[in-house]
Amino acid sequence: MYPDYAPVRYSSYYQPTRDFYYRYDDDNGYMYRVRRDNNFVSALLPILGGAYSAGRPLPYYNDSYYNVPSGYNSLYYDSPSSYYRYGDGAIYQVDPTTQLISGVVALLTGQSLGIGQTLPRGYDVYNVPYSYRSRYHDTDDMWYRYDDGYIYGVDPQSRLIQTSYPVYGGYSVGEAWPSYAGYGYDYGVPDYYGDLYQSQPGYDYRYASGGIYEVEPQSQLISALVALVTGQNFAVGQHLPVGYDAYNVPFDYRDRYYDNDEHLYRYADGRIYEVNPGSRLIERVIVV
């Protein structure tokens, strides 16, 4: 008999309706959506920590195609030794010979982990993106793990997070902006954003891998990720995603929407978001 409830993590959005109810199978890690009129199962929903767990076979419909979200393509791509698949808010490393999940390499939660916090379960496997492995590799004194836009330095004994380094799409705050002038690319901001992110004294803006970056003209170091050009809008009540720590409202709107003790303001894809500084919850959306 399956329990008459959804696991706590899913209870808010797998609510019973007039047409369906849900049951969870602990043995195989799937949520069942069941029709009320005939008690037939209408959908199988694999969930993180259940069907998506280290050592389990990858759910059958994920094994044949690469489905990692585009913002992470340059970080997690298939190779002869391993490949990567996305499901239920996480990216998984998969053994191509056995089709077994080796580990969870990134939880796309939109919430960053904190310094002093214990590293969550599921991060035993080294998962730093390939382009950063020469710099951030495990030692006797420090582990490095990646999660949703950040590389975390972890004490191996206590498993406490000691440092964090923001990265996105292969471009990291504090690193030099790559120069590909010889190939004819200037990485200008897309036309739609040209009026919003114009180069100013002390600031240049560049676009790559779905992000707009603020670059210091003299040193050519990346100082901030100011916008994700994702094509997706955030919603009131949602946590502000990681990568928006720096104030990034376009200059034309800064006299009205500036950070204060009561509100933070952040811009993404044609909208300014009013955010509670304590909870980091989005409270208002302003279309511009």
Image (spheres, helix red, strand yellow):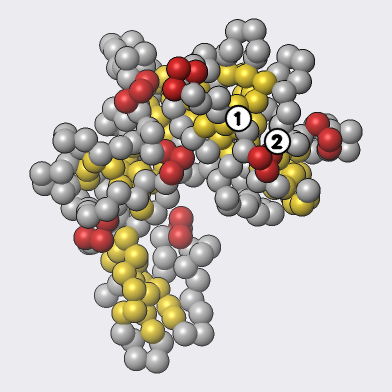
**164, 96: nearer the viewer:** 96
237 left or right, relative to 179: right
Residue 188: give its label.
Answer: 1
Q: Secondary structure at mark 1?
A: loop
Q: Secondary structure at mark 2?
A: loop
Q: Kindly identify which residue carries mark 2.
A: 194
Q: Residue at x 55, y 20 (%)?
A: 173
Quadrant into which the N terminus falls: bottom left
Amino acid type, mark 1: Gly
**157, 279: nearer the viewer:** 279
Amino acid type, mark 2: Gly
Residue 92's image quarter?
top left
**Percent position of residue 254, x then y:** 84, 33
Q: Residue at x 28, y 42 (%)?
A: 84
Q: Marks 2 and 1, how far apart in space?
A: 9 Å
**Percent position of residue 252, x then y:** 84, 35
Q: Residue at x 55, y 25 (%)?
A: 186
**Percent position of residue 75, x then y:** 37, 32
Residue 41's image quarter?
bottom left
Position of 141 relative to 55 (above/below): above
Q: Mark 1: few, some, or many residues within 10 Å (few <14, many ≥20)?
A: some
Q: Residue at x 74, y 44 (%)?
A: 272
**Percent position of residue 251, x then y:** 81, 31
267 left or right, relative to 116: right
Q: How many marks?
A: 2
Q: Earlier in the sequence, mark 2 or mark 1?
A: 1
